[in-house]
Amino acid sequence: MSDSEMSEFASIVERIERGEVPLKSIERELICPICAELFTQPLILPCQHSVCHRCVRELLMPSRDDSFSTDAGSESSNPGSPRARGPSPCTEKLERSISSPGWRRSSVTPRVTTFPCPGCQHDIDLGERGISMLFRNFTLESIVERYRQAARAAVAIMCNTCKPPVQEATKSCMDCKASFCNECFKMNHPWGTPRAQHEYVGPTTNFRPKVLMCPEHEMEKVNMYCEVCRRPVCHLCKLGGSHANHRVTSMSSAYKILKEKLSKSIHYLISKEDQVRTQISELEVMMRHTEENGQLAERRANEHFEHLFETLQERRTEMLRSIEQSRSLRVERLRAQVEEYQGMLENSGLVGYAQEVLKETDQSCFVQTAKLLHVRIQKATESLKTFQPAATPSFEEFVLDTSKEELLLKELSFSGVPAPPVIDLSRCRVYNEGLIHWRLSEDSLPTDHHIVEFRKLGAEEESRWSATERVYGCSTVVSDLAGDARYAFRVKSCRNGVFSPCSPEVSFHTPPAPVFGFLFNEKCGFSAERLQLSKRRDSVESVAGTSFLLAAERVQTGSYICLDYIIGDTGISHGRHYWAFRVEPDSYMVKVGVASDSKLTEWFHNPRDTSSPRYDHDSGHDSGSEDACFEVSQPFTLLTVGMGRLFIPKASASAAGDHSSRVLPMPQRIGVCLDYDAARVFFYDADTMRCVYERPVDCSGTMFPAFGLLAQ
């Protein structure tokens, strides 16, 4: 650096030393991300983050002895420490993360050799040397010690050599690794002796080595800096070690360059103090406005809901009044009718009176009395013939359908909330893990993130909704799904802290066995002229080769040629396994299923007569050979799919002569589950997990996914 830059850097350092940048303000930089306490013997990870040596030793490699000794003056044993070390939730979280599947472990001992950095989550490989390959961060260690000293200024460091009464220490010798008062220091470091040349500092309990040694070559000092790995190395590392082909520079050059960069960065930060303070003021104003506007929005929302409540209460009162009025009117009418019919019962004396009138022999007297009596009896008779209730007891017209209103209330949201997303079924795949895709409406507002919720469905009890972490794209993977189970999924969007309504629920059925991963075997012996394999080996297509075109001149148009078989590159020798695939709807004829290695050898190496479709009973020709030997356990099982249909063998159908029962629509995706131990194979509609066909299979050898393509 130039003289001006050096003076500028010195002024920055002086400013820190004068306390203009207090140590208290940098406390968060001195906290270990694992234990959330002040660093103790911090180690520098390859990603340049630091972690307590104790945390790495206790959490990551508990069974390994390491080269660093425990600090006798650590904060856990010093009552004057500003922060006491204790258990932290961060340690439990890291323990769970490193114990999960996927982290490499040694085959000899159960210790972890690869773990995620708690700062950046990058994988850190300790290698065979383990913790001993990491440098101690002496600079950070010194800063932590100065912070501790400032925090425990009231607790003095005592002399280690005084006889009682012990005096307060004034110096600490870095070579003797002890603290002394003035008199004891003079006695132990007399003039004219080598001890007088010892390095001493102010009272401290942190005694670090004077020279930084190479962790890979313990007897060598670091004197170079690897620009590729960004770490100090020794000359042996450069000559024949792990940094032999790396670009290195001298330690002095690296010191100057890094010091210059650091000084410029510090100067930039200090020069922007006014700007930062202004921005802090603006943020504080925004915080105040946020509080005020949030309270105002809350009051307005309450007012809207109160208005809704009042409107609902008014409608409720009015509609209940209508029901009460109708009920009262109907009861009055029915009561009047009851009284009327009660009067008819009371008219039983009228009948006796009429019978007595009939005994009258004087005609004029009879006519005079019978006229009115006849009218009364006729009226009672007619009312019995035409009985009709005065009112109906049903209140069907008063049934209130509030489903639309309930839906509107459920979808009630602020105007700034986007519309709910829609799960894209065509792009979703659910196996042991679920790949869930969704799409947003074209007029939807921008979203901050999404949350995917899922739950397991069952006949007895449905589990509660579980939620994923925040998703910032339009797809995510849901892990740890149970096999042979139905799951419901839904998605909701969030904008400015407010969630949209959930998307319509969709359900998927997980496979009945763990997913078996494989690619097509490019070396299995298939005809490269007739089968075209993709570069990724995940799809294959049947094409017309030269031999087929030449044979077409000698055979009748429309005849078949033999099947070309291709298999997976991984075999199965135990357990249950599931895989799924898709056959193009316009494919002519494809055989899909499983076959043993012995049967595959026969298929791939025996010569075939291309003019005879009956040479192999699995050639796709309906010769009936498959059906004839169905009951005999064979080392293969193949189904025929093509032309948009799936063909079931005759022997597996209940009615052997019913052709319609053997032909099913071809599913979009076909799933195969091989239970090797039970010697059975199952074929599924992979989208609905409906089993369409199953049968026994001879699993005496290694079984492979097998596919046969037939050209016409």
Image (cartoon, rainbow, N blue to C red):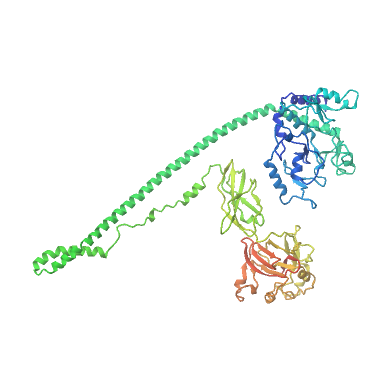
Viewer-nearest residue: 150 or 541: 150
Q: Is residue 309 visible?
A: yes
In this rendering, is residue 660 above or below 75?
below
Q: Would residue 493 be found to the left or right of residue 318 on screen?
A: right
Q: Is residue 169 left or right of residue 494?
A: right
Indicate the quadrant where residue 607 lies: bottom right
Towards the viewer: 135 or 48: 135
The quarter of the picture where residue 37 lies is top right
Depth check: give the residue in front, 406 or 102: 102
In which quadrant of the rendered image does the C terminus lie? bottom right
In the image, 162: left or right of 661?
right
Residue at 63% across, 52% down: 437
Q: Can residue 589 be spotted in the picture?
A: no
Q: Position of residue 691 (x, y in %)?
A: 63, 65
Q: What is the quadrant of residue 171 in the picture?
A: top right
Percent from the top left, x then y, of residue 544? 74, 67
Across and down, in percent, residue 341 comes to 25, 60
Q: Give me the residue at 47% from left, 52% from top.
A: 403
Q: Where 500 sits versus 484, above or below?
A: above
Locate the N terminus and report the quarter of the image it occupies: top right
| Residue ID at (38%, 54%) | 397
| Relative side of 573 to 663, left or right | right
Q: Is residue 499 above or below residue 612?
A: above
Query: Residue 155's spot in the image, x, y percent?
Result: 72, 27
Q: Which residue is located at x 73 percent, y 30 percent? A: 148
Total marks placed: 0
